[in-house]
């Protein structure tokens, strides 16, 4: 019974968590819940990558291999088994933005990459920098004004996975290397 309650508690926590959730501090997840509507989240994508994105030469997780996701950007993601479909070297950003479609500000969205920021150039952008997004991970994201919350030079991965409630997700953008386990 205790195991069932623990599993149920984990599922509820994952269902309430979202792209703005910090995997390092789960207590902060409720701070971000009210600022996001995950019905607008594009779990799957076409698999197209932004122009100029460089394929990783020697990624830890090679295309076709399996890994376990250790992140809860979205409900049902944490502990999911993923298949790597792309690996790219770039800078990944946590951003806060107000959707172009209106609605509440989205805080601490993980991840937007260097190539998904208008006129980002090659240098890592500092926290506090105001930018325009070219990403379409969520409705109202493309063209939105955003603020950089943090930056991480890393390998990012596009992954296929099945959520804990059975939803098939294809070409999910993005999971960082530190969010995967062999």
Image: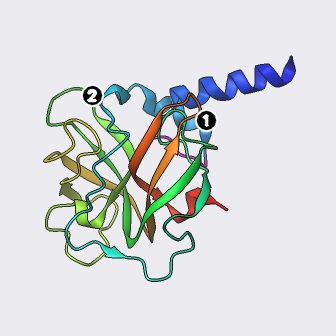
In 3D space, how far apart are the residues under numbered discs 2 and 1 (Cα atoms)?
21 Å
Q: Please say if 83 is above or below 140.
A: below
Q: Is residue 2 left or right of residue 98?
A: right
Find residue 27 and name its label.
1
Relative image position of residue 17 (x, y in whole percent): 51, 32
Q: Helix, strand, or loop for circle 1? A: helix
Find residue 85 and name its label.
none
Q: Residue at x 27, y 28 (%)?
A: 104
Q: Helix, strand, or loop for circle 2? A: loop
Relative image position of residue 26 (x, y in whole percent): 61, 39
Mark 2 packing: few (<14 Cα in 10 Å), some, or many (20+)? few
Tell me where the magenta segment starts and ends, as one range. Answer: 20-24
Find residue 104 and name its label.
2
The image quadrant where one finds the N terminus is top right
The image quadrant where one finds the C terminus is bottom right
Q: Earlier in the sequence, mark 2 or mark 1?
A: 1
Relative image position of residue 145 (x, y in whole percent): 17, 48
Q: Residue furthest bottom?
A: 57
Relative image position of residue 35 (x, y in whole percent): 36, 30
């Amino acid at each position: 019974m205790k195991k069932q309650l623990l599993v149920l508690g984990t599922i509820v926590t994952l269902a309430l968590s979202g792209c703005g959730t910090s995997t390092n501090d789960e207590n902060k997840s409720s701070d971000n819940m009210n600022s996001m509507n995950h019905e607008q989240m594009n779990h799957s994508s076409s698999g197209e990558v932004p122009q100029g994105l460089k394929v990783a030469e020697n990624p830890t997780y090679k295309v076709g291999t399996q890994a376990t996701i250790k992140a809860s950007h979205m409900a049902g993601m944490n502990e999911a088994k993923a298949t790597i479909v792309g690996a790219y070297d770039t800078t990944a950003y946590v951003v806060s933005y107000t959707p172009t479609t209106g609605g509440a500000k989205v805080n601490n969205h993980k991840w937007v990459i260097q190539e998904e920021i208008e006129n980002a150039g090659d240098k890592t952008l500092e926290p506090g920098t105001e930018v325009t997004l070219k990403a379409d991970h969520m409705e109202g994201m493309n063209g939105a004004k955003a603020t950089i919350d943090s930056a991480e030079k890393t390998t990012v991965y596009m992954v296929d996975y099945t959520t804990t409630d059975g939803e098939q997700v294809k070409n999910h953008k993005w999971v960082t290397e530190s969010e995967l386990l062999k």
